[in-house]
Image: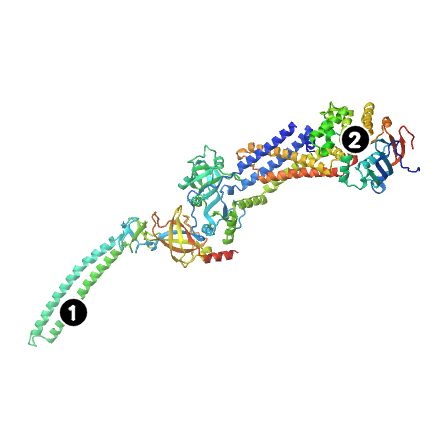
Amino acid sequence: MILRRLSVWIAIGGIILTVTTLWGARDTPPAPPPLEEPPRNPYASTVAASGIIEAVNENVRIAPPVSGLVTKVHVQVGDHVTQSQSLFQLDDRELRAQLQTRQDSIPSTIARIEEQKIRLKDLMDQLGRLQAVEDRRAVSQDDIQRKWHEVEGAKRALIRAKADVRLARTQRDEVKILLERLTVRAPRAGTILQVNIRAGEYAMVGAQDPYILLGDTDSLQVRADIDEVNAPLVQPNSSAVAYLKGSTERSIPLTFVRIEPYIVPKRSLTGDNQERVDTRVLQVIYQFEKPAFPVYVGQQVDVFIERSQASKNVVQETSK
Amino acid sequence: MNFVALKMLFGDRAKYLMLLAGLTFSTMLIVQQGSIFWGLMMYSQSGISNINAPVWVTDPNINQVDEVKPLADTAVTVVRSVPGVEWAVPLYKGVQRARLADGNYQQISLVGLDTATLLGRPHTVFEGAIEELRSPDTVVLDQWAVERLGGPDVIKLGTVFEINDRKARVVGIADTQKSFQNIPFVYTTYERALSYSPPERRKLSYVIAKPIPGVSPESLARRIEAETALGAYTDEEFSWKTIRWVLKNTGIGVNFGTTVLLGFIVGMAISGQTFYLFTVENLKQFGALKAIGASTGMLARMILLQSFLVGFIGYGMGVGLATIFGLTAASNEQLPFVETWPLLGGVFVALLGICSLSSAISIRKLAKLEPAIVFRG
Amino acid sequence: MMTQTIPKPPDGISTSLVTARGLTKSFGEGNARISVLKGVDLDVFMGEVLLLVGPSGSGKTTLLSVIAGILDADEGELSILEQSITNFSAAAKTQFRRDYLSFVFQQYNLLPTLTAAENAAVPLFIRGVPKKMALETAAEILAELGMGERLQSLPSKLSGGEQQRVAIARALVGDPRLLLCDEPTASLDGETGHKVVEQLQHIGKRSNRAVIIVTHDSRIFEFGDRIVHMEDGQIDQVQHVNGEPT
């Protein structure tokens, strides 16, 4: 009977060992909590979107009117500029030389007017004197007639000389305007977001990247991309909340502006140059007051748009 | 009469030990084979258990976790739009090549976690810190990567190697479940994983999600499937899907399954036969008891008591031995060995079943008592 | 063929304990069918020791099995203690055996893992008597049979005669009315066999019991009250010991 006790105890021991081992192994560790709170939907039902922050007046991509060498850049990134403040200067030496030539051609044309005036006066004096002779035989009718023609010719020459002066001035002004054009100016007040040109570089017309990006960082908006699958769920004037990527404790309340009427291909923000279109998105524009914490144009945000009761019902019905 | 039954069982020491040895070793054989099999299955779904997320969203036609069918980037927002989602974040998963400074190549399973939350990160980090992943060009390896890439002398914190010709600096070593093909896990952030991986049209491997309190992962998965064109699985469903796939599409299911099945059949045959022989040898004694006036029911109770008791003892010793085997030979995860409740329960039920069956045969013999058993002989 | 007569009881005994009428039993089917009992009439009276003798295959053991309720007769009537056994169910027969019959086997059929006292007490265990009380009763009877010293011995440590005495103690412990013995002396030497049968006779004589002994052993014929000879499935001759055969 010792055998009985021993074997029973060994058996119970074996089972206890197995069960405890199994309990220990079964203790799969719980999933570790997120390092930052993940973005959570604050509404009963929602349409989620990814968004990007941009200036309300969409960013201005400043380009030069003509291709040319940049001689001076007047602004730095972050500078606030007023309207028509100069941004950068293209090389103007050629036009300045032309201007000098044009400028210098004006005095000679002005001198020509004086010259013609004097000549006219002389001719008119001669004509007066011929007409004053009473003896018809001493002065032939023919002479008088010729002199009169000379006077008239001199009058016209004076008019032409005056016109030449005006032309010379206009030509000078044209060069001045062309010169003015080489100074690129801000089309409106705003903040310089990017400067991609340095003095000494050659600015091309029609370059892909803007040489200077001008935006309005005081009043910002969010462009929310919604998968076309979810496009029917979005109602105008729905309220929405945005969270900056990686800081989800602080929310940004949004106000509806408009739904872009045209569905566009989604741009993948992977840093890859290659264009990869795999889905199309509906874009909805929301405005927001600048919050207490810093936000920047171009920052990605997670957007939650409140789904209206009506659209929710549609989904529930289709899902049934 | 119970004490008579027990004395009959334990009285003959040699016979009892033979019986017990048969039951113990067949139990041990079955449990050990079954546990190794299940351990292999656990290896095959390590890609799921290492991430430890409640709900996995992916292509509806996916077969198993390592066969990624990437989604469009907007799938994350589509999942977030489903009611009952507490959070949903992207996850990159793909096999890439790592190259060491000495020129050695090694396949790695690259995992890209959502940058802000690092959801899906490993539970235990042996060295370094997972938060360091936010620094540029950083990765966290697992212990198998350390082993496969050259050992702890070569791979330590600060080691720099290349993944697809991009620099990767080790900032942590984490604990993960070994994978079936022993491809080590390398964790990094989602965006960095995209830049490490070669260009593809779509790159989002999975969206992992968690239901809000009050919603079960199952109902959330069903809801995601109903409201989106995506496939959604709870981690358990996805594990089973992967295991079923491995069983169906690799030789492991047939080869190892046959071994396990044979182990089971052999073990059960030995158990049944041993116990049957024991009762047959006692048939004369039971016959005498029957002649003296013991009813069939009483004899049946005695035989069942004997079979259940010896079955229980043999089972206890068998699983104990199997567990000791698991704790020693299979330590350090060198050998896959995972005992599970269904296996232990199944073996218990099967063992008692086989004991009952052999008892039933003996009892049938006793119900119709032949005089030859008691008279003469 | 001599006419079957109803055997008369021996002198001074009148009450029948076992009454068998026209018992037949055969085994097998068709051509292989063998009739073992061909219409047996037998009365066993209270207080007698009945010896059942005959050559091998004459049907002695089959008759014993039928009386014990282990085999069912094909035809005929059997009543024990005025109860008609023939119509009992198997379970009722088992219970009847438990309460009124007991056995002594040629091979003793002791449980090898139980001590002498425990073996002797088995019938009481079967009836649900508490272990301690059953063991005390068994010990008393073993002491009566001269086995008081060997209570804790296992059967393997006992001689043949001692084992058979344990078996007899087991047969007696339940206070049976009918004791059925199958070759109780076959495995014993002459002297021991003699002693064993003496004890059996002593028991049979006591109170209103009966003992049926199936035997080949002519040395023990003198201990019976009647000797029933069987031949080819029939009772051939009934001999009153110390009296004339009928």
Please give left or right for residue B19 compared with residue C68 in the image.
left
Q: Is B368 on the left-hand or right-hand side of A132?
A: right
The location of residue A98, given as percent across then percent down, is 23, 56
Residue C191 horizontal/vertical position (percent): 82, 23
Quarter of the rendering containing residue B135 = top left
- Closer to the camera in the image, B216 or A86: B216
Q: What amino acid is labelled 2 in the image?
A: Phe
Left/right of residue A39 with respect to residue A111 in the rendered view: right
Residue B107 vertical placement versus A123 (above, below):
above
Secondary structure category for the residue under label 1: helix
Residue A245 higher or lower than C158, as above or below: below
| Residue B264 x %, y % | 64, 38
Mark 2 secondary-structure assignment: loop
The N terminus of chain C, quarter of image: top right
Which image quarter is the C terminus of chain C in? top right
Query: Contact, CB < 8 Å: mark 1 with mark 2?
Result: no
Q: Which residue is mark 2?
A: C105
Q: Amino acid at mark 1?
A: Gly
Q: Which residue is mark 1?
A: A153
- Give percent across and percent down for residue B177: 51, 38
